[in-house]
Each structure stands twice: as C-alpha cells, then as structure tokens.
Image: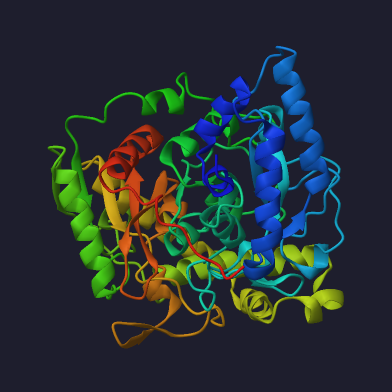
Amino acid sequence: MRKEDICFMSACDMVEKIKSQELTSVEATEVIIERIEKINPIINAYCTLTFDLARETAKNADNAVKKGEKLGLLHGIPTSIKDELETKGIRSTFGCKIFESYIPTEDDIAVARLKNSGIVMLGKTNLPPFGYAPITTNIIFGATKNPWNLGRTPGGSSGGAAAAIASGLGPLAIGGDGGGSIRVPCSFCGTYGIKPNFGRVPHLFSRLGGSISTFTQNGPIVRCVKDAALMLDVIVGEDDSDKLSIPKPNYSFLEKMQEPPPKKLKIGYAMNLAAKIVDSEVEKSILNGLEKFEQFGWDVEESDLIDLSYSKELVLGRKLPKIRDVFMVLGVVWASSFYYVLDAMRLLKDWEDKIDPVLAQMVKLGKQFSAKDIKRAEIQIEMICNNIARHFKKYDLLITPTVGRTAIGIDKTLFDLVEIDGKKVGTSEWLSYTYPFNMSGHPAASIPCGWHSDGLPIGMQIVGKRFDEVTVLQVSKAFEEVAPWQDKRPTFNL
C-alpha cells in the first residue's frame, strides 16, 4: 500500500483495517506524521503537534486489538483537534496571545468522547483568535495557507483543520462553527463538513459565553461523507454540564448511511441570502449540482428565502428598523460579547496590545453597542429564525452556495473588500450564506461541487430541517457518489 494512499484513506476504511491488523495504527500514524513533517511547514495547518502522545496511543491501540479488547468506533484513527477545544495537559490557545501558555486541566466534552472512542491525537489545528474570522491567522502562529493555492486563505475559523484534511494530514478533524467556521473552510479547501443541529454536541464551557455559545456547534471535517457520520456517532448526545445539549438519537448516523436516500424530497434553492451577488462560476456549479439531484427523482425549485431580516408574523405587520443588514446582526452579537467577556476577565487593559488588530477593532466596536442595539439584534435573530422555519414548512432541504466565491487572498482581513466578477464587495456579501443557520440552529453541511477556473474548489451548502442531520448526510452521500471529488489531491514542491 502506498504511503499517500494511507494518508488519503477514509476513516471508515482505516478503522476496519486496524481492527483486522491489515494496517496497524502505528503504521498509519507514522506515515501521517511523516507527511505532516513535510507539508505542515508549508501550509501551517497544525499549531501544536503531539507526536509522542500519538505514537504511544497508536501502540496501545494495536496491543488492544491483539488482546481482543473491546474497541471504540474510532479505534486507532489519527485525528486532529481545533485549538479552541480544550485538551487536558496540552496547551489550548484559542489562537489568542492571552492564552498562549494555557494548559487545560480537563478535556472538552467532544474531545473526551473522541479519546474514549480510541482516536490517536496528532495535535491541535490553527484558527483565528477565538474563531472570530473567516480567515485563519493569528499573532502566535501566523497564517495557515490554502493547500490548493498558497496565496489564498483556507478560510476560518477551522482553517487549520480543513487545510490538514485536504492535504492528507489525517483522516479526521474536529472543528467548531459559530458563523460558518466549519463550512467556509470546507468550501475553500474542497473538504466535507457538517455543523450539526444546535445542542447535538455539548460544550464543556464557552469562554465567550452569552449569545455566541448558542450559535456555536462542534462537528467533523473529513474527506468522505461516511466519516462525518462515524464521528457524529461518537460526539453527539446530552451532557449534564451543558444545559442546552439534547439526548443522543436512538439510531446510528453511520448505519443510516447504509440505507438508500429518500425517494421523495422537495428541495428549495437560493442563490442570494442577504447578498446581491454571487460569482458566476460558483452559481453555475451549484445549478449543475442541482441537476444531479433531479436524477434521483427529487423535486427542485427556487425558494423565496431571500429577505431573512423581516417577518410580519413577529411584528404584526410593522417592519422593525433594520440594523443595516443581517451580517450586522451577527456583528452586534459577536462584537459586544467579545468586549464584555474580555472586560469581565480584566484582560483588555493589560492585553490589548497583544490582541489581533482586527479583533481589537471588533472589541472597541462592541463597547459602543447599547443595550437597545443588542436587544434589537436579538429580535432580528428571531425574525431570521422565523423566515427560515417558513422555508422548511414547504421544503425538506435548502441548497445554497456555501460561500459567494472561492478562497480569498491570504492577506485579506474581515474588513477588506474582495472581488466577485469584477465588483468590489465586503464580507457581508460573500459570507452571507452560512451564519443565518447558526442563528437558527439548523444542521448544515458543505460539500465540494466543482472547480473554478482559478483552480480552487467550490462548495455547496445543504441545510436540513431541525434535528434532521440524517437527510443532510444521506443526500450528501448520494451527491458524493455521482460527483466524487476525493481523487483530486493538492500537490506540493517537496
């Protein structure tokens, strides 16, 4: 078996080979470590490496197989952890200088579950400070590069995780998504990822707290849809430490992948969500993807889900004054949370000069928002949720671009303009498709659906009804089978 084939093997296939010892965990781990040592210096996907721990865990995994011990669902599988998830005894920086030397004393719930399932932890992956941006860079570790074009960003905030998966630096990664932070990097890097329904994966503790913690959900970033289902089987389910977590379903996501997809589905699509422009090649790629859905006999039509910020049902026919646009609603919540939490931790005075400059701007902006601004944002979030719910009264799924264009330049910031078909647009234009579903909590995935003439991957977002990850996964798998992408791999000058 070629080393590269091991590096790009699916987790589902790898775990079966490890259980039979056709491939040992030690062999898989060593091959992937060798690849990380060659490629990570180029793309900077991992910010903290745990190779000694990985080697020890892999050895123990193989010994457990030989002894006939009970094995976990992810037994012996090399896996990466986003650096915003706390890992016991291993530094967790959240991409922020404030926590550069922070060593947690316990694991995040999802991390603990992954460990209990038998993973081999390769290390922590890079992110922007506190996961605030759709670009992965920070003062401690620098920028992560897109493996398809080193001059572009892999997206954010789970940019290190997606870049690692796309580059064959492990079959499984766990990321977090508070506004698109799983889906945007998957779109930019040509990987698959799903943000589960809010509450599926409990949190140990959110350092930012407040409304942000109701937007954020951890989930898998992978190369194969079935691997996402496998990881979900491990990490979902309630925990008493998270009052908003929900019970584990009475079925296996992976077993549901063995069933045929639904015979009848009504699918609505929307090319504009709060945005007025989408790259013409991205739009064409999504429409081509929708044609593939039709071959399954599913009904596909354009949805009227465009103006997310207005809901006459909630305001009794009177239009509430808008806070500029839907993106600004998200900005009010995030910026105010950053300010109040950092202020409460008494970190602003001593650490402001060590905070990422763009994050510092957001913190200062958050200070300016009044209680009225924040309450108005909360009301508009309810409007957004109501309009999304209205769509799902008529349709089983919603299809959109994941992002309005391909990966932006690595030097761009949250406040910079970028081009779409020659027009200069802000972040609110190209990032408008993902964050509404953090507000509503619906499950949403990004799946590769084509390639742009610039040589970069294009992602399609598949959004399901509340608590219906199964349909999202089954439709994703059906699409994967008729439009596979895994045979295309980035190349590096090694």
Q: Quadrant of the image for the N terminus?
A: top right
Q: How many marks?
A: 0
Q: Can you tell which quarter of the image residue 280 is in? A: bottom left
- Residue found 68% across the figure and 14% down from its top: 70
Q: Nearer the viewer, residue 255 or 481?
A: 481
Q: Nearer the viewer, residue 374 or 57?
A: 57
- Residue found 79% across the figure and 48% down from its top: 51
- Residue found 64% across the figure and 43% down from its top: 79
| Rendering coords of residue 180 (x, y %) | 48, 58
Q: Can you tell which quarter of the image residue 431 is in? A: bottom left
Q: Nearer the viewer, residue 191 or 368?
A: 191
Q: Nearer the viewer, residue 478 or 101?
A: 478
Q: Is residue 270 above or below residue 51?
A: below
Q: Is residue 38 above or below residue 226?
A: below
| Rendering coords of residue 331 (x, y %) | 52, 70
| Rendering coords of residue 178 (x, y %) | 54, 56
Q: Is residue 89 left or right of residue 383?
A: right
Q: Is residue 178 left or right of residue 101?
A: left
| Rendering coords of residue 493 (x, y %) | 57, 71
